[in-house]
Image (cartoon, coloured by chain):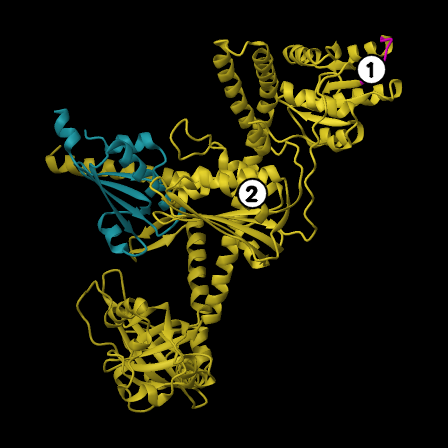
Amino acid sequence: VTADESRILRDLTQRLVEAEATIAALLSGQIDAVVDPASKTPVLLGEAQRALRASEERYRRIVETTNEGIFTTDVEATITFVNRRLAQMLGYPIEEMLGKTLRDFLPGGAADVTTLPPRGEISDDEVSEEAEVRLVRKNGSGVWAQLNRSEIRDSEGKIIGSLAMVTDRTRHRSDQTALRESEMRFRRLADSGIIGITIARLGGQVIETNDAYLNMIGFSRSDLSLGNRLLTDLTPPEFRHFNERAKEQLLTLGFARPWETESFHKDGSRISLLVGVAMLEDGKYIAIMSDITERKHAEAAHLRAEESLRRKEEQLRQGQKMEAVGRLAGGVAHDFNNVLSVILSYGELILEDLKPADPLRIEIGEIHKAASRAAGLTQQLLLLSRQKVIEPKVVDLDEVLSSMRTMLERILGEDVKLLVTMTSSSGARVRVDESHMEQVILNLIVNARDAMPRGGTLTIETSNILLTKEYISKHGPAKDGPHVMMSVTDTGSGMDRETQTRIFEPFFTTKEAGKGTGLGLATVFGIVQQSGGNIAVESELGTGTTFKIYLPRVDAAVDSPQIMTLPARLRGTETILLVEDEEAVRSVTMSILRRQGYHVVPAQHPGEALLICERHQGAIDLLLTDVVMPQMSGPELAKRLAEMRPSMKVLCMSGYTDEAVLRHGVLGMDAFLQKPITPARLTRKVRDVLDGARAARATCPPPAD
Amino acid sequence: MPNAKTRAVLRLRLYVAGDAPNSLRALSNIKAICASHYPSRSELEIVDVLEQPGRAFADGIIVTPTLMKLAPLPVQKVIGNLSDIGQVLLALATK
C-alpha cells in the first residue's frame, strides 16, 4: 500500500471508530443535538428539545409579560415580531403591525429613526440607540415613547435585523406635572408655619425667610433683612463649629447632613433646632429648620429621671452591703462580748484584790483598758448591724450640742475654731437615742479635725427645714416633711468623688493603718438610718467637706431625763439562778456575784436550770440567764419557770440582740443586760432588778468605753 | 521524558447544544477531570452549536456533546456526556 492509501485507510478506520462511538452514545441517550451537514443547522433531540422549548417558553413569557413594548425588524426594517404590550400600547392587533415599518407609526417627517445606520462590518460591540419619539396610535392619538434599539446578528456576526424596546413615557410626562403639584404643596408647607425655611448666602446674609422661622426666633423680617443680622450671629458660640462643618459639606457635597443646634431667641433665651441645608445656585443655600426645644426638654427630663433612678439603686446597693457586713459584724460581736466579759470582769476583780501599791496593778490596768476599747469597738459593730438595743426618745439637738460644746472644743484643739449656729427658738427636736447621737457628732468632729491638721474652722449648724419630694428623689430614702438638719462643715483637705462614694462603707478608711477603724462614718450612717434620717456629703478637694444629717422633726416635748438613782447598796444575800452555757462567762459571773454576798446556783444549760428549780428547797429570787443558748432560749426558759416560781425576777443578758429577742424581752424579761458584763454594771443591774426598779425594764446602759 | 509530558498543555474544545442536559453534564465532567488530573495545564474552549453551527461543521462534529482534544496531537474525539472517566482519560493520554 502507498502512503496515501495508508493515510486514507487510517482516516476511514478513525471515522468508523467515531461512528461506532456516536451510535453508542445515541443509543445510551447521551446526545443532545445532531448537526445536519446539509443545512449546517443543529437539530435538537428528545430531552434537549424539551429543555430548549422550556427555555424558549421562559423567554416568551418574559417578552409577553414585560411592561416594555418589544419589536424586531429584519435588515429592511420590516417589523417581524411585536409583543402584546406594544400592540396594546399602540392600539393595533399584532398581525396588523407585522410587515409594516416603524415609519408607519410615526407622525409625518420623522424618518431618521426608522432605519439602522448601515453597518456591513462584523463588530463585537452591539450598538444601542436611544431616542424619544412620539408614536401614533391606531385611533390617531399620540404616545411618548422611549426607544432603545440594538442589532441582531447571526452566528457569523452579520447584522440580520434589530430588536427594539419601547417604553411608554406618557406616565413620565405626567410625573413632571406631579412634580409641579409637589412644589405647590411644598410652598403650602412653607407657609403653614410648621417648618422654618430660610434662603441665605453662604456668608449668612438672609435673602428670604418664612414666618415659621421668624416665629421660632422672635425676630421680625426687617431685623434679619439687609444683612442687619447674620444667621451665624444667632448661633451660640459653642455651636458655631457645626455651621462651619455644614458649610464645608455644602461646598463639597451640595448639602449637609441634618444636625441639632441651638439658636438665640430675640428675648435672649435659646431654642433647639434641627437643621438641614442644601446648596442653591449663586452661593445661596436653603435651610429647613424644625423647632425641637420641647423635645430637648423632654429628653433632659428623661435623663434626669434616669440619673435619679441610678442614684436610688446605688443607695439601695450601699444599704444592702452595709447590712451584710453588719450581720457578719453582729455575729462576731456576740462571741467577742463573751470573751470581753471574762477579761473585763477578772480584770476588775483582780484590781479589787490587789494592794494599792502592787506593781501588777499597772499591767492589769492596761489589760482592762485594752478590753474596754475592744468593748467600745464591739458596740460600734453592733450598732452597725442594727442589733444593739436602741432607746429612742425625744431630744433637742441644740441641747445635745450645747452640753457637748466643751468636750468638742477640747477634741478639736486650739488650732481649730468651732462655730455653732443653732436653730431659732423653735428648737431641734428629734426622736433618737441620745448616746448614739452624741457618737454621731463625735465621729464627725474627729474626722473633721483629722482633715484639718494645720487648723481651720469647724461649723456646726442646726436648722428646721421642710424636705420636698424633689429633694428626696435626688438625695435618697427619707420621708418628706419637716426635718431637723444638722450640718458639720470643715475647711479641710476635702475628698475626691471616688472617696466620697465609699466613705460610708464599713472598714473603708483614708487614715493611716492603725489610726482609723473604718467604722466611724459607717456607724454614723447606721445610726442616722436607724433613726429614720438621711445623711449627705458635699466635698471639694482643697476646700473642705460638709456632712448634712436630716432627721425627722417631732413636735412632742423633750423626754425628761431618767433619774438614775444609785442603789443604796450593791451587795445582797438573795439566791440567784445563773444559766450560762459559756463556762468562762459563767464562772466569772459567779465570782462577781458571790463576792457581793449573793448565793449563786449555776446551771450549764436550760435543762439543768429546770431541774434545779424543781429540786431547790428554798426561794430563788432571780433568774440571770443568757439569751441565746443551744436547746432553749433564755426568755423561753423564763416563761417555763414563771409558773413554778412566779415571784422569781428575770434578768437576761446577751451580746447579741435581734428583734426577736427584744420582743421576747418585752413579754418575759424584767430587765436586759448588754454584754460584755463588768462587775460594776452587773452588780448594779442585779440590785436594780431585785429591788424591783421599774425604770430598769428593758433598758441598757450606755456602752462602756 | 516524563517531565516534558507533564509540562505539555492540554487543549480541549467541547461542543455543546445550549443548556441541553447532556451538554451541561459533559461540561461539568470535563471541568472536574481537568481540575483533578491536569490542574493549571489545560485550556478548555466551549462551542455552542446552536450559536455557531458553522464551527461544528468545520470540525466535522455531527453530534453534541463532543469533546475534541486538539493538543497534544493526535486529535482525538470523545462523544457523549463524558461520564465514563476512564474512557475520557484514555483519549486524553498522549500516546
Residue A495 in view in this figure: no
- Mark nearest the camera among 1 and 2 is 2
Q: Amino acid at mark 1?
A: Ile
Q: Is residue A70 visible?
A: yes
Q: Chain of mark 2?
A: A
Report whether mark 1 lies on the same chain as mark 2: yes
Q: Does residue A81 lie above or below A496 as drawn?
A: below
Residue B23's x, y, as percent? 36, 46
Looking at the picture, tell me which residue is in the foreground, B84 or A352: A352
Q: Which chain does the yellow colour mark?
A: A
* Placement of the C terminus of chain A among the 4 image quadrants: top right
Quarter occupied by residue A224 = bottom left
Q: Position of residue A40 (x, y in %)?
A: 29, 56
Nearest to the observer: residue A295 or residue A115: A295
Q: Is residue B74 magenta?
A: no
Q: Point out the stretch of residues depicted in magenta.
A: A616-621
Q: Is residue A37 left or right of residue A388?
A: left
| Residue for badge 2 | A403
As measured in the structure, the alpha-carbon distance from the residue carrying label 1 to the one carrying label 2 is 44 Å
Q: Amino acid at mark 2?
A: Ser
| Residue A250 against residue A45 in the figure, above or below | below
Which quadrant would the N terminus of chain A be assigned to in this image? Answer: top left
Residue that carries the numbered disc 1 in the rendered image: A620
- Quick check: A31 above or below A604? below
Q: Is residue A663 above or below residue A648?
A: below
Marked residue nearer the N-terminal end (1 or 2): 2
Q: What chain is tagged by disc 1?
A: A
Which chain is displayed in cyan in the rendered image?
B
